[in-house]
Image (tube, coloured by chain):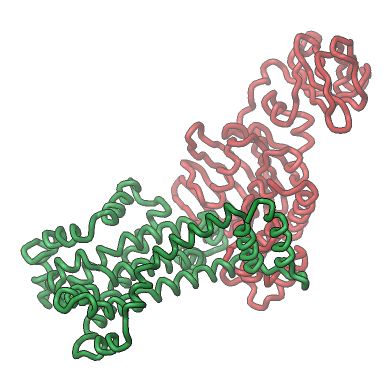
Amino acid sequence: MSWAASPAAAAGGAALGDDPSGRRRPPASASAAALRRLSSASGLASGLGALVIWVALLGPVIALLTHLSAGEIGSAITGPGNLDPLVTSLAAGGVTLAVLLVFCTPLAYMLARGTLPFPRIWEAGVLCSLLLPPLVIGLLLVFFVGPFTPIGELLNATPWHLSATNTFLALVIAEVYESAPYYVVGAQAAFADVEPRIEEQAALLGDRPRRVFRRVTLPLAAPGLGVALSVAWARAMGAFGAVIIIAYHPYGLPLQIYNTLQETGLASALPYALILLVVALPLPLAAFTWSARARRRRRG
Amino acid sequence: MLDADVEVDRREFTVRVAVSVAPGERLALFGPSGAGKTTVLETIAGLVQPRAGRVELGGRVLTSTAPPKCFVPPWRRRVGLLRQNPGLFPHLTVRANLRYAPGSDPSGRELAEVAEALGISALLPAMPARLSGGQAHRVALGRLLLAHCDALLLDEPYTGLDAGLRRTLTELVAGLVDERSVPAVLVAHELADAQAFADRLAVLDRGRLLQAGTPDEVVLRPASRRVAELVGYLGFVPGAGPEGGVIGVHPERVTGGAQPGRGIVLTGTITARRPAGAGWEADLATGGTVVTCRLPERPGAPGDPLVVTAVDPPWWPESAVADPPRAAAKRAGP
């Protein structure tokens, strides 16, 4: 591979990219152009570098797949009560997403539109919860919603004698704290991408604000909101730091992995890791695919 | 009838404007960037609340700061606003954009007619991202027409489009305003755009209306020196005779040689010359000032004498060089 070789290779690539029918095929020609770049020395070097990083990032997943056997997975799934943490995680994750959608979507919209007074302070608050280590969040939550705090006593005074430690409620609270900032930051960016001028047009055409939100803002922000929500889902599914402190029971998948690791060792924890990935990843992947497709549709 | 008499506070100055536009009439608000033209449109559309004033459209009070106080929100005003960014909904097809307004056209017949009139019938299934600038503007215009707006506000909509396209779109809008008999207000900072569109021209500067009248009146008889500057007068020479005053010289309203019957003869020496389009531009030192004139033929070299005639130039007495009060800008009722 030398510099001299590249013009010829480029010409060949161009011929490949030509479509005899005259129709445009953007993805194919984009890939062809990328392949063409690889035929130069520097292009090849950067391509190889990218490949190394990509493989390194995926390494742990590859390791997981190569160290698992069907038998281990089978026995992990069929053991009595072994799937209870999965159910707990799914339920708590579902409730968490609902909480985020209902309470954090309006906040994200107001942050994006700058309609709150002192917007920087609000943003700093969201960032603060994003930057706090989950373990510290858990620790502080004990002092915030634990049984001997005003909020804890208030919860206990309800007819259902709620408690925010070692209950399903506690698990949801911990997951909300770990995932909310990811959703708020992502949703804020999604709303900020919707031009206020377009909402203004909708209003001038006769839509009251709520209808503008439903007919224009939400559909336009939806791809970004979907991605933000799925990232939050992945965080909620994997929430561990805050959970281990205030919601050890009823335990979900991350704690099941941790406990299995503690009690019977690495090998028997692996099947649960696979289950966690299988549960946590499809939603984000689907959201990314859907979001990309929605953007493509908009381009016509 | 669209009536607006409003005061809106801006950071540097207060916009104080009174305009009234009859159905089917086309008013152009002309002025430099930052004069407050867009603020006036936004106040009419209900996007900006005035500190004081009143907006009325077809007998409906839209804004009133005097009791009984009233502020109709933008979505109930039925005022169409077209900006430079046509603001099409990118997630909807052209057809869905056109029928966006609630309750517009269930049968689709009117949509087909409007699309035909605007030449966008073939684009109905397309997504807005696929449209050219001119096509997007036609769609945005069609969307306003199908929403049955009672007034049409145009905020420099054709900035960035090429001259031919601007002319076509301007003619299209003017025809539609006639046909539908709605009041229309165009904001422009290019005089040619304002002239091409308007029956009446209102000159706005730093939030104040300086003059309103037919485009010819404003351009040929600017009410003050500032208006003259805004509509392109580049030279101001002291008037001769006992009255004194100031004479405005527009570079394009100058003809070579002494023709005393057609205007004021200016004599002086050339200080600079340069090609300008198909003709020439010369700077002429005369009467202690410098006047720029456009001439069809190549003028002499700097230092050479030159005699030109400013054709029918406007003249102001010394006292009128200041701006007139804003009451003068309001139109007499129909």
Position in image of residue A158 (x %, y %): 12, 73
- Dividing the picture into quadrants, the one containing residue A266 is bottom left
Q: Is residue B327 visible?
A: no
Q: Nearer the viewer, residue A16 or B18?
A: A16
Residue drawn at the location 20% of the way across and 59% of the way down: A137
Q: Tell me, what hue is chain A?
A: green
- Dividing the picture into quadrants, the one containing residue A30 is bottom right
Position in image of residue A33 (x %, y %): 64, 61
Residue A98 position (above or below residue A11): below
Residue drawn at the location 77% of the way across and 69% of the way down: A22
Residue projecting furthest to the left: A148
Position in image of residue B325 (x %, y %): 61, 29
Can you say which quadrant of the picture contains the N terminus of chain A? bottom right
Number of numbered discs on residues: 0
- Dividing the picture into quadrants, the one containing residue A232 is bottom left
Q: Left or right? Give the position of B114 relative to B6.
A: right
Q: Left or right? Give the position of A20 relative to A27.
A: right
Residue drawn at the location 46% of the way across and 69% of the way down: A288
Residue B264 position (above or below residue B162): above
Residue B2 position (above or below residue B251): below
Can you say which quadrant of the picture contains the C terminus of chain A? bottom right
Q: Is residue A155 visible?
A: yes
Q: Left or right? Give the position of B50 relative to A173.
A: right
Q: Left or right? Give the position of A198 relative to A165.
A: right
Q: Nearer the viewer, residue B36 or B328?
A: B36
Residue drawn at the location 74% of the way across and 15% of the way down: B245
Q: Nearer the viewer, residue A40 or A263?
A: A40
Residue A154 position (above or below residue B302): below
Q: Tell me, what hue is chain B?
A: red
Residue projecting furthest to the front: A1
